[in-house]
Amino acid sequence: MHIAAHDVGRLSRLIAGCAGATVAVFGALHTSIADLTAADFGRVPAVALIPAGIALTVQVVPTTTGRSRVRTGAAAVFALAAAGVGVAALAGHPAAAVATVLTGLALACLDLRMPTRGGIAYRVADPLLLGAAIIELVALVPRLFEPSFAPGSGPDGVMPVFLAAPLLALTVGAILARPETGPPHTDDESGPRVAVRRLAPALIVTPVVAAVVSAFAARSGASSPVVAVSTGIILAVLALLTVLGYLLRSLNDADRRQQHLVAELRDRQDFADTLLQSMNEAVMVLDANYRVIDVNRRWRELTGHQEPPDESPPLPPPGTGGDWLLPRADGTDVPVLATMAAIPDAAGAPRGYVATYVDIAERKQAEVALTAHAAELERGNADLAAALAFKNDLTSMLTHDVAQPISSIASLAELLCDDWADLPEDIRLELATKIDKNTRRLIKMMNDLQLLFRLDTGSVTARRVPVPLLETVQAVRESVAGAADVTVDIDEELAALADRGHLTVVVENLLKNALTHGAPPVRISGERQPGDTVRLVVQDSGNGIAEDLLPSLFGRFMRGSGLGLFIVRHLVEANGGSVHYEHATPQGACLLVTMEAAPS
């Protein structure tokens, strides 16, 4: 049957307590009231059994942590009292007195330990109990075989049996009172615990053999009983000394092996520390509660901390890895590739964690630079695409819109040159007028292209001044052909804060667009809006603009030359205004220009 270690300890302390109580009762039974009141305790050494038994009983009484000092102090008082009685009995009963003093002192310092240079702490009570046990065995062993001697010639003892037996019980009880101080468990077959287990039968048999030899010598007449007993005692003591010498040698061997193991463990720890500090990755070791145990040199360099933090910094989840921001001592963060791994114990539960950090600051900088370069390339590609589209649109416009008036001018000029003399005066005037009209059309296209290039480069600036709307619209209407069907409804006091030349170009392009792509009549109106703005409206009576053309209505090259509405939008925006399109009621296109009103 397997018994738990703590159950064995409780049974051992129970036996020790029973031994102490029995010894105290035994001492009380062998001591009378007269003996207790006598001034000279040296005549009655059994009196010492009472406080010694009480001391042993008190030592095994279970207590809490706060009451252990009270128990130790009470046991020490009773034990020292027993030792004092033993000192008083030295003259009359030297052997019993010495055994009593040793046992009392052992009980008084039962929990006292003395450290050695090897780091091992020995109990002070152990040699005291050993000395008392030797005296008690010397007194008891010859008495075991007293019947084997001739009548009246029994062996003499160093102390009476009624004292030796309870003193031996006290010694054994003191050993059993602290079972946890026994030899440590070890699997080493050459350790002191194994040596004690192997030599225990010899320790028991040796005094028995010595007693048998003594009895045989006394019966054969080879020696007097006293000499025979002394011979047996000497043999027992020599055997005991031999055993002690063997135990000391075993302890010495165990100490050397322990020193070797400690040195090997220290070498392994130094190797582990060297390996940890030499790693290029920053490493942090934590316990199961995420408290920092150790960090390596690279971690200190990466974070700027010279000592491990008292509190654990933010950690990535165990078993995962990825980009992480490691806080530095100066309050900044360094980008790292973090990994968190658990250190399992024998049962598989985490007994600690290891966090590793790889500095990826340079990689992040390279990624940012690549991202910026890619964005720059994308913007460049967009600019190239826009430039290519502009080139294609410009080529298409030059091919169709510009080529037509040039071709007309060339053919009309050739006709005039070849048939000048034969042509009537009115035909020559008509041809010259057409040439002039186409020439003016080309000049208008060139001016629009020049303005287009300036708008694309952002070199157009507006010098805004108060400009009367009615005056500007009337001047444009008089200069545009086909303006007879144009009506104007604008207050004379209404003025916009704009560049006069820009506003003239805007009105001209809007009016030409309405006459060319819409249908008469065309109405131009203006009104003041809330918020100190004015609105100029150009409305025709045509079919309006198709829905599919609205997204690119104010883009380049819309409807043939297409520069008109594109120039309108840019010039209005350059003057701080806006332009948009609405469907007219009941039909037609309505273009609305909103600009800042001039101060009254």
Image (cartoon, grey):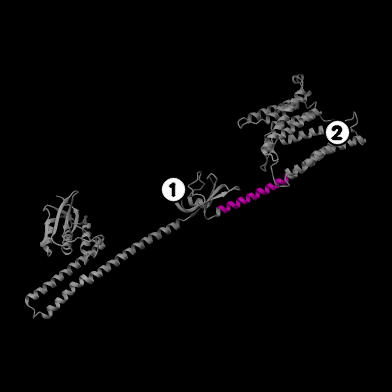
Q: CA distance from mark 1 to mark 2?
A: 88 Å
- Whether residue 367 appears in this view of the structure is yes
Side of 381 where 207 appears, left or right: right
Front in this rendered view, residue 449 or 419: 419
Query: Residue 331 got which mark?
Result: 1
Of badges 1 and 2, nearer the viewer stands: 2
Q: Is residue 269 magenta?
A: yes
SS for callout 2: loop
| Callout 1 amino acid | Gly
Predominant secondary structure, magenta span: helix
Residue 319 is situated, as x and y percent measured from the top left of the image, at 52, 51
The structure residue drawn at horizontal position 12% and vertical position 79%, both measured from the top left corner, is 417
**Furthest-front residue in this view:** 586
Circle 2 sits on which residue?
A: 145
Height in image: 82 above or below 2?
Answer: above
SS for callout 1: loop
| Callout 2 amino acid | Phe
Q: What is the span of residues highlighted in magenta in the rendered image?
A: 251-276
Height in image: 521 above or below 239?
Answer: below
The structure residue drawn at horizontal position 13% and vertical position 64%, both measured from the top left corner, is 480
Picture quadrant where residue 463 is located? bottom left
